[in-house]
Image (cartoon, helix red, strand yellow):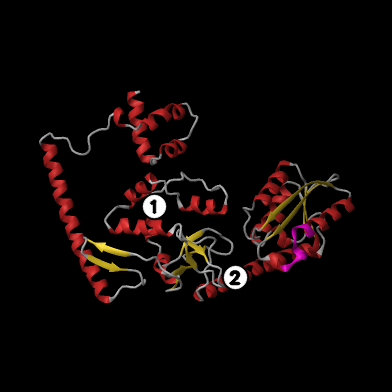
Amino acid sequence: MAKQTIYNAGIYVRLSQEDMRAGESLSIENQKLILTKYVKEQGWNLVDTYVDDGWSGTDFDRPAVQRLLSDAQSGKINLIICKDLSRFGRNYIEVGRYVDYIFPSYNIRFIALNDNVDTASKDTSALDMMPIVNLFNEWHAASTSKKIKAVIEANAKAGKYRTTCAPFGYTKGDDPNHLPVIDPDAAPIVRNIFEMRASGISPHHIADKLNEDGVPIPSDYYYAKLGKPNPRRTRHMWSPETVRQILHNFTYLGHLVQLRTRTVSYKNHKVIKNDEEDMIVVKNTHEPKKIKLVIQNSITIDCTNGELDPMTKAFLQIAGVFGELEHDMICSRVKSGVANARAKGKQVGRPQKTLAQIPDKVKEKYSLYKHGDITKTEYAAMCGISRPTLDKYINLMTETL
């Protein structure tokens, strides 16, 4: 590495959520104070300070560390300083790759102050010990991860509810376990969704009905109660998938299903779905939704206690078998009828919509969309229709207007 004469320094500081428990000694401000003072004492130019607050050291996709590395590779800085090696990272392979290979190739000096690591001083024992220090730092991250996971699992088994916000129709309780409490404003909407599905209405048509009635989607409702705009990128319209998520959520039966997902490892933070046997289910932790299913206006199945008796379960299984047989028979007849109609030259399916059947609101806003003044998502929201329906209207208007 060529000898540098003028150093343009970049200070890097990091604090993970686990490090916050260590107190002031590891705080962002404390790291800044120590490193800024050191840079001034050496007479170097302080170009910038790079801060990753709340990020794990095993993750090298941190925004500030990526900006730091980009500035170093572009020549904006030629000296990187951090409080110790663990602040730069707790992945010994990645730390070693940067310090031993990447930084020297760009003629960048690296200093970990408290570990006495300085790549400009090749003969120090600290550089010889650096691989061992990095390995210990990663072991610390692995050990901390195991402890946190053990606490999370123990809390889940004890029925403590871990979530940022409760499912739609519930709020987080103020009790020590933060168990879901029925939200009187949203609960009727959830009950209506279950009742519509029980009466045979598909999730697609349930979503359309909710959109027609102007019912806010769960995320819009959540942030409205907080008095904030919804920061998520959304169409602000109900979709069949949102309806299905509510219908398949065991929370509405009064049970807690936790540890549904996990990360691949303490170094790979990709979230994957847990196998069912690895999920933790604690039954009857909170009040379920009061729902009764009525089948063909004659048979009532009471789900209000969250459990079904053996006879009811057997009936539903038998009904399911016959339902599948009936479904197959109807499908076969419909396919045969369609084939016969086509063979006779008859029109099959819904008649093609005409321009006159398109709602006036859709036609009025079409010019705004055509000239790029609004997006398709905004267009659909203004007209109160779904994107697939809007696509059909747009195709028809494009052909005829």
Is 391 placed left or right of 116 in the picture? left
Q: Residue farthest to the top?
A: 401
Q: Indicate the position of residue 222 as horizontal and vertical percent values.
A: 51, 54
Q: Which of the image's four quarters has the C terminus?
A: top left
In this rendering, the answer to whether 264 lies above or below 65 is below
Q: Residue farthest to the front?
A: 184
Q: Is residue 201 magenta?
A: no
Span colored in magenta: 22-30
**Image-quadrant location for residue 379:** top left
Q: Indicate the position of residue 297 as horizontal and vertical percent values.
A: 22, 61
Element assignment for label 1: helix
Query: Mark 2, residues whose alpha carbon is within 10 Å: few (<14), some, or many (≥20)?
Result: few
First in residue order: circle 1 vs circle 2:
2
Q: Indicate the position of residue 255 as horizontal and vertical percent values.
A: 42, 70
Q: CA distance from mark 1 to mark 2?
A: 32 Å
- Secondary structure mostly seen in magenta is helix
Query: Mark 1, residues whose alpha carbon is within 10 Å: few (<14), some, or many (≥20)?
Result: few
Q: Indicate the position of residue 188 as horizontal and vertical percent values.
A: 40, 58
Is 142 placed left or right of 387 in the picture? right
Of the residues shown, which amino acid type is indicated by label 1?
Answer: Glu
Residue pictured at 45% horizontal, 71% vertical: 286
In this rendering, the answer to whether 36 lies above or below 355 is below
**Image-quadrant location for residue 273:** bottom left
Is 329 placed left or right of 218 in the picture? left
Read off the residue under disc 2: 148
**Is label 1 or label 2 in front?**
1
Observer-nearest residue: 286 or 14? Answer: 286
In this rendering, the answer to whether 312 lies above or below 204 is below
Q: Is residue 25 magenta?
A: yes
Residue pictured at 38% horizontal, 29% vertical: 363
Read off the residue under disc 1: 241
